[in-house]
Amino acid sequence: MEVVFYIAAIVAIASTILAITRLNAVHALLYLIVSLLSVAIVFFVMGAPFVAALEVIIYAGAIMVLFVFVVMMLNLGKKATEMERQWQRGSMWVGPSILAAILIAEVAYMVASPVTAAYGATAIEPKQVGITLFGPYLIGVELASMLLLGALVGAYHLGRRTPEKTEKK
Amino acid sequence: MASIPMQQGLLLAGILFSLGLVGLLVRRNVIFVLMSLEIMLNAAGLAFVVAGARWGQADGQIVFLFILTMAAAEVSVGLALVLRIYHRFKTLDSDAVSEMRG
Amino acid sequence: MFHLLWLIPAFPVAGFLILATLGKRMPRKMVPVFGVGSIGLSAVVAILIAINFLTSAPQGNSYTQVLWTWMDVGGFRPQIAFYLDALSLVMILVVTFVGFLIHFYSAEFMEEDEGYSRFFAFMNLFVASMCTLLLGANLLLLFLGWEGVGLCSYLLIGFWYRDPANGLAARKAFIVTRVGDTAMTLGIFLLFDKLGTLNIQELMHRALVQWPVGSTLPVLAGLLLLGGAVGKSAQLPLQTWLPDAMAGPTPTSALIHAATMVTAGVYLIARTHVLFSIAPQAQLAVAVVGAATLTMAGFAAITQEDIKRVLAYSTVSQIGYMFLALGVGAWSAAIFHFMTHAFFKALLFLGAGVIIESLHHEHSIFKMGGLRKEMPVAFWTFLAAGCSLAGLPLITAGFYSKGLIIWDAWSSTRGSTALWFFGVFGVLLTSLYTFRLIFLVFFGEMKTKIHKRPGFRMLMPCVVLGILSVVGGFVDTPAFLGNIHSFTDFLHLALPPVTEGPLRGMSELGSEGLVTVAFLVGLYVAYLFFIRKREYAEAITTPAIGKALHRFWYTDWGMDWLYERVFVRPIMWFARVDKSDFIDYIYSGMALITELFYHGVRKTETGRMRWYAAGIAAGSVIFLAIVLFL
């Protein structure tokens, strides 16, 4: 089973790298979906089937789809791809790459602590998740719902267009 | 289910996070910036789930749920703003939206 | 009654505070109630105290009221203490009474002005400072009053501050008197250092005991105090500020620059008379300054055309007489002349104010004329004051006081023939310019129409002062004219009498006679030139020598020109050259560094999102590194 984890990890990393280096937005988004699906597999391997499903349904299924819709709506075309090629030069990758490398090194240092714990391989069922969610984490649920309400209203307002005149701001 | 050392899970999360960071810093198109942001959020959530699985509790998954909620809310508002930026500036270049420079 | 002494300065202080804080907010009619009322109350208290003093004099002929200790620093313990004796009583009476009349006058004079309450606030502060000066028992309190009157003089000269010329005149007054004040401060330091106290009576006593007559220390101290007096009283060489001070409102000129502040120097010297009696060289300097000033100012006055400037130079000249009296040891005569001068000079200024107001702010006497019939009250009071100034024999106050000074200049052991001669010549000049003024303003044909007539509030003080200018002299008359000595006898409670030397062939009658002759010569010349044959005036000033002389005297013997070249220009040049020396670089350097910093930090605010994100990322990476590895 560990093999599945490693394969899914490599696929995730590879597709992420591809996602951030594409010139076409839709291509990048599709690669990102692949990455998300791989992460879902990792979740499943680790005994968290609930969030695996959640990842696929909501993250890859709703959020990414929203992205794709917006990109399609913007209708960027060939000109945008040309501009992207202009904007991205090799020299621009150097600084962030160094920064990322340092970060990875620090993370590796952090997790390479003497405490290794192989953990039990029991899966945590959705029922258990549900009981914990509506038990101790009830307030979080309420807050999350308020957040979603705020996002809803905000997105509605920002997306609105008054029919007569075009907005200035 | 297999038992995978926590360090490797966390390492995977760290690598994904750094990749997202690189994408954020390099790309000029705001769509890509938002996308990189999603990558980073996902990586953070992965770290949480790994930790939760290590201790055998549901808390990790619950936090991931919250992260997911937050990502959804942020994406919806963010993309609405992207649309607004496009209407106003006629471009998706994040460097063009620098009117608050000093 | 004496314990009410502190009320005399306290009422004007209260008036000042009320008007300064609430003046703009109170109804306009209320302003003079506070402004004039406070001085009125002071005058009433002064009169009550005077009656008490005259009927039952306190022990030792002086009264000291200690209010509190000002400070207690290292053994230096000056007190807020008021000292009342005959000298300060006379001066307080004159200051408060004449001050009250002038305030009453200005209630109408300044009525239209927008700075009505500000004016009264400053005038009240002035009277408070003057009273502090006169009543101060120690030199520190006296100096406080000294500075206070200087400040109020500055504020009132520059009262109409919107015109920069007024501000310039105020600055000039302040700076020139500052020179004198510095000398006075040095004198005070010297006295304190050598004699250990600042209480005036104590000081005089110690000086008498410790310093031999004619030694350097009292002479030095005397000269330094003379420097201060010269500045404040506008004598040579510091008299240049007084003619320019006429830029202030006329009541200010009347009160400050005629009757009271400019006599502060006279008071100072009279107060410290012991010091001068043991320093004959310093006293001689006082007399010489007085004699020179009265002559020079007299010449200047006969050429002026602005009515107030004539009166200003006249003031300088008359104070010269007072200094002359002090210089020959005739202390009481000087105070007598101070009192009569306060009456007639204040009246002259108030009358000038009436004329200026009626002719709609016309100042030049060559544009006035024929006002005799139109403004009878103004004419008669002005005439009374003018005759008193010139010294019309027998019926004016000025005759008696000036005659006394001139006689003492001859007869005193510290007097001399030369000083007496200058005094007599000064009478000629005084008579000449006074009657020139009167003839040009009131006689002849009218050149400017009358716009407005003065009201009761402006004329009543003029009438009162006019009466005083006539009868005020009868308190002290020469031996052959009644031999009344009430005034000088009263002052002898505080000041020593004149020591008379050998008469050298002149009697008092003879001296008065020659004074009368000088008066008549001046009167006749003025009559000739300005009533009968005005062509003579042009005939004299047309040839080159006449014109040059006229100009020379007109510009006060060129002193302004001299000071400009010798003092003002070098200092301004130096200030300009030293504008950015290295100390300035320290300050500008700090500004420069801050600016550099600003430009540096400004570069980080690009407005670009990626830049900020990179900043956050780099910061967190570094922070993480610190947490992990340090």
Image (spheres, coloured by chain):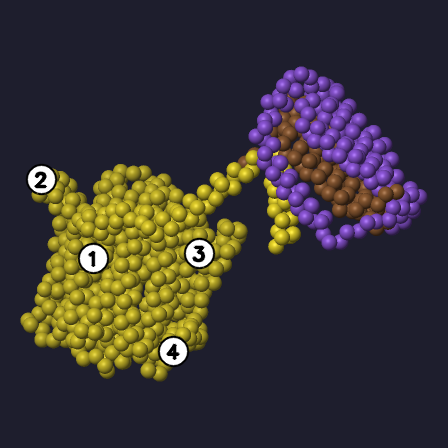
Amino acid type at circle 1 is: Pro
- Report whether C457 appears left or right of C333: right
Residue in the image at 38% along x and 78% along y: C75
- Numbered label attached to residue C466: none
**Residue position for label 1:** C237
Percent across and percent down for residue C582 are 33, 50
Percent across and percent down for residue B16 are 72, 37
- In three-dimensional space, the C-alpha distance between marks 3 and 2, rounded to whole angstroms, equals 50 Å
Colour applied to chain C: yellow
- Report whether C149 appears left or right of C411: right
Q: Earlier in the sequence, mark 3 or mark 4?
A: 4
Q: Secondary structure at mark 3?
A: helix
- In three-dimensional space, the C-alpha distance between marks 2 and 4, rounded to whole angstroms, equals 68 Å
Q: Secondary structure at mark 2?
A: loop
**Residue position for label 2:** C543
Q: Earlier in the sequence, mark 4 or mark 1?
A: 4
Position of the C terminus of chain C, as image quadrant, is bottom right
Label 2 packing within 10 angstroms: few (<14), some (14-19), many (20+): few
Name the one closer to the observer, B65 or A56. Answer: A56
In purple, which chain?
A: A
- In three-dimensional space, the C-alpha distance between marks 3 and 4, rounded to whole angstroms, equals 36 Å
- In three-dimensional space, the C-alpha distance between marks 3 and 1, rounded to whole angstroms, equals 32 Å
**Residue position for label 3:** C121
**Residue position for label 4:** C75
State the image quarter where residue C131 is shown. Answer: bottom left
